[in-house]
Amino acid sequence: MNTTTPDSDGRRRRRRHSAEFKADAIAACRRPGVSIAAVALSRGLNANLLRRWVAQFEADASGVCAIEPASRGEPGVAHSAPAFMPLALPVSSAAAPATDIRIELQRGGTAITLSWPSSAAAECASWMRELLR
């Protein structure tokens, strides 16, 4: 469906929708079991346009930064997201004990289990590369 209407001189112009109309259409789409396409059809809108309105509404509600598309050469309007807030994590009194790297290899009926200190992980990786060559 097209969202442009022919003017009296034959040129097509983009329709403008009020904030109330948009809010009513978005509210209708957010009801359980309602199809956005059906709501768009009942209001004479393009389903993709209505889907974009709903997505912008949900992005604004969740605090995600959403840019409203520019119209007629005007820059888009940016909606800012909430500021970053660092959280302090509790420091555990006992550090977790370092575990060893454990490698189990099997070939035919032979099995080898290897324990390597995690503090020497780079050397273990080098050894594995040489072994798998």
Image: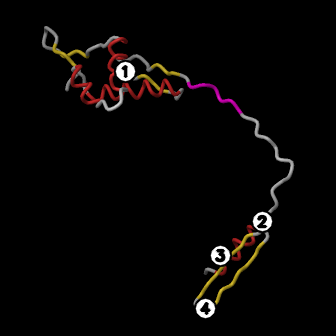
**Which residue is the site of mark 4?**
109
Report if the CB atoms under discs 3 and 2 are less than 8 Å apart. no
Say above or below: 87 vs 22.
below
- Distance Cα–Cα, label 3 vs label 1: 59 Å
Does label 3 or label 1 sit earlier along the sequence?
A: 1
Q: 10 Å neighbourhood of mark 1: few (<14), some, or many (≥20)?
A: few
Looking at the picture, how far across and down is residue 88, in whole percent?
76, 36
The disc placed on residue 129 is 3
Please tell me in which quadrant of the rendered image residue 110 appears: bottom right
Pick whichever, 10 or 127, lies toward us. Answer: 127
- Distance Cα–Cα, label 4 vs label 3: 23 Å
Total marks in image:
4
Pick whichever, 115 or 125, lies toward us. Answer: 115
Amino acid, disc 2: Thr
Report if the CB atoms under discs 4 and 2 are less than 8 Å apart. no
- Distance Cα–Cα, label 3 vs label 2: 21 Å
Residue at point 65%, 30% (across, down): 84
Does label 4 or label 3 sit earlier along the sequence?
A: 4
**Which residue is the site of mark 2?**
99
Does label 3 or label 2 sit earlier along the sequence?
A: 2
The disc placed on residue 27 is 1
Looking at the picture, how far across and down is residue 44, in whole percent?
21, 20
